[in-house]
Amino acid sequence: MSLHIPDELLTALSSAERVVVLTGAGISAESGVPTFREAQTGVWAQYDPRELATPQAFARNPRLVWEWYEWRRKLIQQAKPNLAHHALVDLEQAIPAFLLVTQNIDGFHWLAGSRDMVELHGNIARTKCFEEGHVVGWWPETDDVPPRCSSCDGPLRPDVVWFGEGIPEQALRTAFDATAGCDLFISIGTSAVVQPVASLPLLAKRMGARVLEINRDQTALSVLADWSLRDKASQLLPELIRRLGYPTNAIDGA
Ligand code: OAD
């Protein structure tokens, strides 16, 4: 299927030297991972995710929050990266200076093969000590829910950014520095409203970069973007790679 891709966009993409890509939950939606706001089904339907994804909620009821993340982890383990994730690996290999900035915590970009990337909101597969903050790779079998930290005996928690928490300093600086110097900024599958991430495309625009948005629905960014394509990422991105003639790593039906 040939999607409508403006020639001017193909020209901008083929001549781009420094590209920053921002992704959100929409790029994983077609892997079967519900977006942050759609995720609440079954027993979790009674909870507002913003009420669970906070340090206060964890301090109040660590078992409930830990079990919610366990449930989301299992959902993600049953899914896999889709053609959109693989197309971004092809793009990374074709562009001289490339950075992928993701808000997603599913780890699918890394699994697909992306390496020049930062995870602004952490990764659900990683666990850390609630008190001391260090990542914990392993803990002994226990009936404790959540398990306890072996050094301070405090509860363990997922290594993700909760509401009211700051984004990892280094990752954020890397994202802003690359955005300030890019010549093309691509926003994919994000409602582009959560700060400070939402200010990245505006910074790119202000610094003279062109901005491409690939999103199923209209967002606050749509009117500012040079191109705003209302397509599914897993259809449009592989088509872009094909039209640009870049080699692809995607295995058919990946
Ligand atoms: P949202 O659920 O806010 O937005 C997902 C966007 O993806 C929507 O605008 C959809 O239209 C679009 N979309 C859905 N399916 C798509 C597809 N197949 N192709 C292209 N676009 C598609 O998710 P995010 O913007 O990622 O933060 O949310 C940002 C942050 O808000 C999350 O990281 C989370 C939440 O608070 C934290 O957990 C700290």
Image (cartoon, helix red, strand yellow):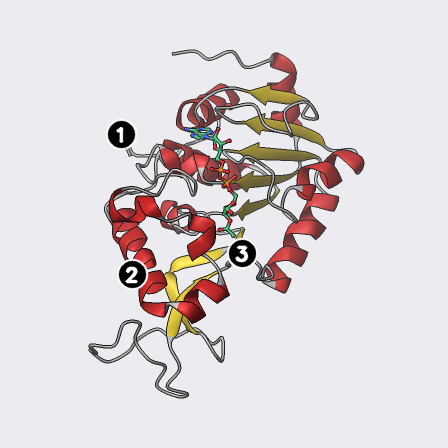
Describe the element under mark 2 as helix, strand or loop: helix
Q: Is residue 172 left or right of residue 109?
A: right
The residue pinned by badge 2 equals 67
User: How many neighbours does mark 2 have within 10 angstroms: few (below 14), some (14-19), or many (20 or more)?
Assistant: few
Front-lying residue, 175 or 142: 142
Q: Which residue is drawn at 49% across and 75% down?
A: 133
User: How many neighbours does mark 1 have within 10 angstroms: few (below 14), some (14-19), or many (20 or more)?
Assistant: few
Q: Is residue 26 left or right of residue 70?
A: right
C-alpha distance separating marks 1 and 2:
32 Å
Quarter of the figure that contains the N terminus: top left
Q: Residue at x 34, y 35 (%)?
A: 82
Q: Which amino acid does label 3 sit on?
A: Phe
Q: Is residue 192 left or right of residue 58?
A: right
C-alpha distance separating marks 3 and 1:
36 Å
Q: Is residue 139 above or below residue 25?
A: below
Q: Which mark is residue 166?
A: none
The residue pinned by badge 1 equals 253
Q: In this view, does 223 lie above or below 21?
A: above
Q: In this view, does 55 lie to the left or right of 66?
A: right
Q: Is residue 233 above or below residue 172?
A: above
Q: Could you say where residue 166 lies in the image, as x and y percent from the top left? A: 60, 61
Is ligand 1 within 8 Å of the beta carbon of the residue shown at mark 3? Answer: yes
The residue pinned by badge 3 equals 163
Q: What residue type is labelled 2?
A: Glu
Q: Could you say where residue 75 lies in the image, as x and y percent from the top left? A: 27, 47
Of the numbered discs 2 and 3, the one sitting upstream in the chain is: 2
Of the numbered discs 3 and 1, the one sitting upstream in the chain is: 3
Q: Residue at x 32, y 44 (%)?
A: 45
